[in-house]
Image (cartoon, rainbow, N blue to C red):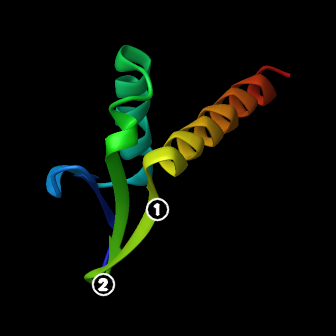
Amino acid sequence: MDAFYQLWDTTTGNLVTEFDTEDEAIEALLEIQAEEGDDPILEYGLLRFQNDHPTLVARERDLVAYLERARERRVAHVAGART
């Protein structure tokens, strides 16, 4: 079974949305972060589900750091493509 991702609000315990891929989740979270800063991200947890088993990807401050690493990988990939 393919993996999918869920974004949860850790303050309310509510499911925010679901993503088919990690890239979709990262893109959506980076857009939120670009528009609203880190504050909303600090309230979220990202989980990966595979075979009905959830695994925490990152939450709160760790999610902010996770997005920073994702952003750095994208910049490095674009820079590498230009050379």
Decide: is 56 above or below 76.
Answer: below
Side (left or right) of 52 relative to 22: left
Q: Mark 1: which amino acid?
A: Val
Circle nearer the viewer, 1 or 2: 1
Q: Position of residue 4 (x, y in %)?
A: 31, 63
Residue 19 visible in the displayed image: no
Q: Position of residue 14 (x, y in %)?
A: 13, 54
The N terminus appears in which quarter of the rendering? bottom left
**Residue at 42 percent of width and 21 percent of height:** 37
Please tell me which residue lies in front, 59 or 19: 59
**Residue at 42 percent of width and 52 percent of height:** 22
Task: Answer with the quarter of the image where residue 31 lies.
Answer: top left
Measure how far apart labels 1 and 2 are at the Cα level: 16 Å
Q: Which mark is residue 69?
A: none
Please tell me which residue lies in front, 64 or 78: 64
Please tell me which residue lies in front, 69 or 4: 69
**Residue at 37 percent of width and 45 percent of height:** 25
Q: Badge 1: few (under 14), some or many (20 or more) residues near its Cα, within 10 Å?
A: some
Q: Mark 2: which amino acid?
A: Asn
Q: Position of residue 16 (x, y in %)?
A: 17, 47
Decide: is 23 above or below 81.
Answer: below
Q: Position of residue 6 (x, y in %)?
A: 27, 57
Task: Answer with the quarter of the image where residue 47 lies.
Answer: bottom left
Decide: is 1 above or below 60.
Answer: below
Task: Answer with the quarter of the image where residue 32 lies.
Answer: top left
**The residue positioned farthest toward the right in the image shown:** 83
**The residue positioned farthest toward the front in the image shown:** 11
Q: Earlier in the sequence, mark 1 or mark 2?
A: 2
Q: Which residue is mark 1?
A: 57
Q: Element type at marker 1?
A: strand
Tag 1–tag 2 contact (CB < 8 Å): no
Q: Which residue is mark 2?
A: 51
